[in-house]
Amino acid sequence: MLLETKDVVKNFIGLTAVSHVDMVINRGEILSIIGPNGAGKTTLFNLITGLLPCDHGHIIFRGEDITGLPTHEIAARGIIRTFQTTKIFSHITVLESVTIGRHLRTKSGLVASLFRTKEMKREEKETTEEAVKILEFMNMTAKRDFLCDNLPYGDQRKQGIAIALAAEPTLLLLDEPANGMNPEETIHLMTLINKIRERGVTVVLVEHDMNVVMNISDRILVLDFGTKIAEGTPAEIRENTRVIDVYLGEDLT
Amino acid sequence: MRITSKVTRIGVLISILAAVLVPFVITESYHLHLVNMTYIYIILAVSLNLLIGFIGELSLGHAAFYGIGAYTSALITMDLGISFWISLFIAIAAATLTGFLVGYPALRLKGPFFAITTLAFGEIIRLVINNLEGLTRGPMGLPGIKPPNPITIPGLFTIDFYDRRAFYYLILFFTIISLGVVYRLVFSRVGRAFLAIRENDILAESIGVKTKHYKILAFTVASGMAGLAGALHAHYILFISPVTFDLAQSINVVLMVIIGGSGTILGPILGALLLTLLPEVLRAIAEYRMVIYGAILVFTIVFMPNGIVGTIKGKLGLLPAAEEK
């Protein structure tokens, strides 16, 4: 078990976004979180990464309680997420954006930067090399000098993943990675997510594209109005009448 | 990453060489004075650019740190008889410390709220200087500041800083140091953290950047550099008064950064040059100076939202054509 949420609750005014959710993420798996719009999927990501405080409950990561820690501290422990928004970084190049993702894996501070120490120079070189490798892995080498703003929609999503990977996460949270991708890009995305898992990264995704979810997930968790209504393998979820009622509809069965 | 690093290096070398030769070309004392003032403004503008251009927060109180540096150094040398070469560093330390103390709470705020807070802080400092008459002589200003103590190398020569040319090299030295500090800071892991904050602070935090820490760092460094500019100003002009460090001055430096091109190295330098020399060119119509400033600002925002340098870079395909904010 890599991460566990225990009885997590988040209330917004007049609305319970996440209601007593117990969730377990196992090391090395691909877990999908699905559910209708407003079911609390993204809110759950925000709670895990500390962007929003929990009203109740605990989040345990590698046996340690991380509830209430600042976001950068949670990131330093190995939980990195991507965002639904496409506007990631605008006025810098793709390669630069990925080097920013190396922040946690490098150390040079004010003094080292001002005096250009040997260690700092070595780190700078390594940072660029690693960023180049990640863009190769993402199949984005050709676009390394593009300004982020000028990337097509699907590539902007991939760029978000590249930045996250640069931080070498233990647990990667992907928020609707297939959103805005064409069918071909979506197929590549599935291969990519599998490759990321092969690197030893545990992947959790929030996704609406059922083709992606059913194909790559080891397990699926279904939320509705902030409550967990089902959990299981893709086959089990497909058969679950409650899930069909609230989300999947009849066609998919 | 920087393919152009060789070109940059040669450019820097040529610029320094040209700068060293300036006093031999510009012999007219008043003209050299203008160059000296330009350099002081360059220090102010490049430091403010760390905030506006790199962490993306607008400070309207930069002149306050300029004033803190100026008054600290002036008062220490006059009242305690301490050498300029020590008071200079005390002035930088005072401005740096104040920057930290102000930045720590103020940077909890963002955008307009942060700008208003810094504006208020700037006004407070000005009012304090204005009203602490026992110490600062208030609005009457502080005359009789001594220039830096002469440097004597026995048997060889004495550098006397009453000489504008000698002061030129002193300011040049600190301007180069300031530019070096900003350049090295910007092109480093720290600079990338600044950029991440400017571009998307939530994403920055999510990939582990301690956004608060880096914002305070930028603010503190910028304040210290403004303090340096202040100390140089005080011992160059030899008279300081609160009006030099008021809101209009803060805005003046903001304009230098924005018109020149925030977020670039050359932009604020160009902006400082332009806005220091422009009033001289417009001397005949001095009363309309602010009107013309206003017109330039409006023109820049409408037609060159990324400033002069930003627009040129955009034309060369190094920046997106226009910025929506």
Image (cartoon, helix red, strand yellow):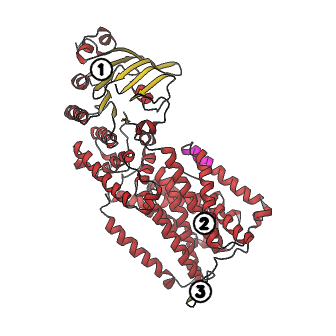
Q: Alpha-carbon distance for marks 2 and 1?
A: 62 Å
x, y percent for residue B91 = 63, 64
x, y percent for residue A107 = 41, 50
Three-letter amino acid code at the position of disc 2 = Phe
**To which quarter of the image does residue A117 belong?**
bottom left
Which residue, given by chain and number where applicable, does mark 2 sit on?
Answer: B89
- Figure check: A239 above or below B260: above
Provide the residue span drawn in magenta. B107-118
Residue at 66 percent across and 61 percent down: it is: B68
Viewer-nearest of labels 1 and 3?
Answer: 3
Q: Chain of mark 2?
A: B
Q: Secondary structure at mark 2?
A: helix
Q: Residues within 10 Å of mark 1 (few under 14, many from 20)?
A: many
Which residue, given by chain and number where applicable, does mark 3 sit on?
Answer: B158
Is residue B254 shown to the viewer in this render? Answer: no
Relative side of B60 to A202, left or right: right
Q: Chain of mark 3?
A: B
Q: Alpha-carbon distance for marks 3 and 2?
A: 22 Å
Which residue, given by chain and number where applicable, does mark 1 sit on?
Answer: A220
